[in-house]
Amino acid sequence: MSDAETATVRVIADRDVCIGAGMCVYADDTVFDQDDDGLVVLLVEEPPDGEGVRRAVQTCPSGALRLAGR
Amino acid sequence: MSETTTAPTELPVYMLRDGFDPAPELGALRETERVGRARSPFGIDVWVLTRHDDVRAALADSARFSNAAPVRGVPGMPKMDEATIRRMRAGNPLLVDPPEHTRLRRFLTPEFTVRRMRRLEPRIHEIVDERLDAMQRSGPPADLIAEFALPVPSLVICELLGVPPEDRAGFEHRTGRLLNMSIPVDERMRLQAESRAYMSGLVAREQREPGEAMLGMLVREHGDDLSTDELIGIANILLIAGHETTSNMLGLGTLALLRHPDQLALLRDDPDAVGPAVEELLRWLSIVHTGVVRTTTTEVEIGGTRIPAGELVVFALPAANRDPGATTDPDRLDVTRGEVGHLAFGHGVHHCLGAPLARLEMRVAYPALLRRFPGLAEVPGTAAFRSFHVVYGLTELQVTW
Ligand code: HEM
Ligand code: SF4
């Protein structure tokens, strides 16, 4: 459905920047996880645009997360 | 109600409080000059950032606001040679910049993942329940700080690190004085050395026979990458930051709830209300006044104020967290707010390493306390606020139930 398509976002996670604070996992654990080193892992690269994803990007303390256009 | 306040008179504006609130002067500074000057308790002048946006941006900018430059020229500070200074600073992530910071922090990050914390949760419940049982056995009144707020995080960090719980009285006393700005700097330097000496004993034991807890793990897995001085420094900061902070959130947060009974009831009765309530208490109380002082590496301009290179800057976290530019009606405690983005744990690369642990402890401890003692009440006149300390909080709070 085109509606659902426009409502996804592409998340870009920079693991060199991530400090493993886990805020993103708290914000939305269907999209973000941490590996054994504590660094961010994306479970879904283009999740539905939702409050959790936006909150994760906004609160990530290290600036490791951003949303790409489209 | 008469409340004891034990503050020395000349605290800098960024440490001044009025009960739960930052002093009106601090809010006024934020709304007028925006960037202020103050004389730190060390006796040196610092710049003070107050607005949410300014503080957040500067915290995220470790290239221009450095943690690594040792603060010099502190009156009364004993002279130390470079080697001693280096040893005293080793292993503390708060005193280095990237890439050195990244290296240190990478050793510790795996220990504080959300998943690790979930595994620890049952044990935290047990520790909390044991303390509540003990309070119940000895009956009211009780000093909530000594019987609950301090022992819970202390016992948790002991267990996590592998520090003998019977050493608690010693390190709690030492930490309390170490972070107390009304104690002369040479005395505090001595306590700092004592604290490291204590830790070096524990680290030596782990090096002979690594245990199962975090210290043993660090020795086993990173014994070759970390010097002994670094191991001591890491263990030391984790022990200090791990109990003093959360304990003040538990104490001061409980008092805040007791004085807002409707909000207390929400947190007690609705499990979904607990997470957002903890965040709001963190924001509203902002118990860490500033974090560590930064040094500008270049000239910076903030809202029309030019700060030259090589100057000391502090971030007034309570001012930033009560900024009307970032939060609606910021002085009101509202546990249903559900807003994110407070700076109580800092921001940027030094964002609190222990935040997942502290959050978990609070999410377990507040509701457990309030459910065990539904009639919990403060004994009027016993709440003792302490503002001369690096971490704001209560020295005593007598409660009945
Ligand atoms: C509610 C409790 C806590 C609060 C409010 C708090 C607050 C803070 C703040 C504001 C910072 C940043 C300081 C700065 O940038 O100058 C920080 C850093 C830090 N905290 Fe916490 N903290 C808490 C609990 C803990 C716990 C439980 C631990 C350890 C288990 C801990 C360990 C650390 C460490 C190691 C750092 C330095 C991180 C770095 O430099 O990368 N904290 N904390
Ligand atoms: S919030 Fe940011 S720093 Fe923390 S784990 Fe997620 S990506 Fe990494």
Image (cartoon, helix red, strand yellow):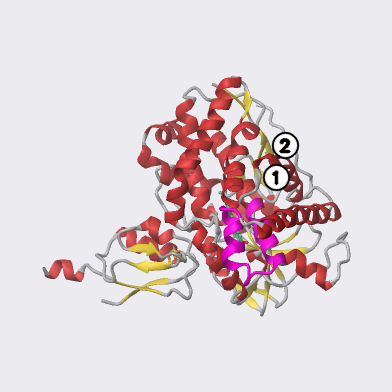
Seen from the viewer's position, the closer of residues A32 and B179 is A32
Q: Is A53 drawn above or below residue B332 in the view shown?
A: below
Q: CA distance from mark 1 to mark 2?
A: 8 Å
Residue B247, image x and y in percent? Answer: 60, 42
Q: Which residue is mark 1?
A: B387
Q: Residue at x 46, y 54 (%)?
A: B116
Q: In screen coordinates, is A13 left or right of B387?
A: left
Observer able to see residue B111: yes
Q: Is residue B100 magenta?
A: no
Mark 1 is surrounded, within 10 Å at the Cα level, by few (under 14), some (14 to 19) or many (20 or more) other residues, namely many
- Whether disc 2's CB lies below 8 Å from ligand 1 is answered no
Image coordinates of residue B335 in percent, x first then y, are 43, 42
In this view, B59 is above or below B40: below
Single out the residue that lies furthest toward the left.
Answer: A1
* Residue B333 seen in the figure: no
Q: Quadrant of residue B237?
A: bottom right
Q: Which mark is residue B109?
A: none
How far across and down, in percent of the image, does residue B162 sit?
61, 50
Whether the residues at callouts 1 and 2 have beta carbons within 8 Å, the answer is yes
Magenta: main secondary structure equals helix
Indicate which disc residue B5 carries: 2
Secondary structure beneath dot 2 equals loop
Q: Residues in magenta? A: B211-239
Q: What chain does badge 2 belong to?
A: B
Query: Mark 1: which secondary structure?
Result: loop
Q: Quadrant of the N terminus of chain B?
A: top right
- Horizontally, residue B108 falls left or right of residue B395, namely left
The amino acid beneath tag 1 is Ser
Q: Which chain letter goes with mark 1?
A: B
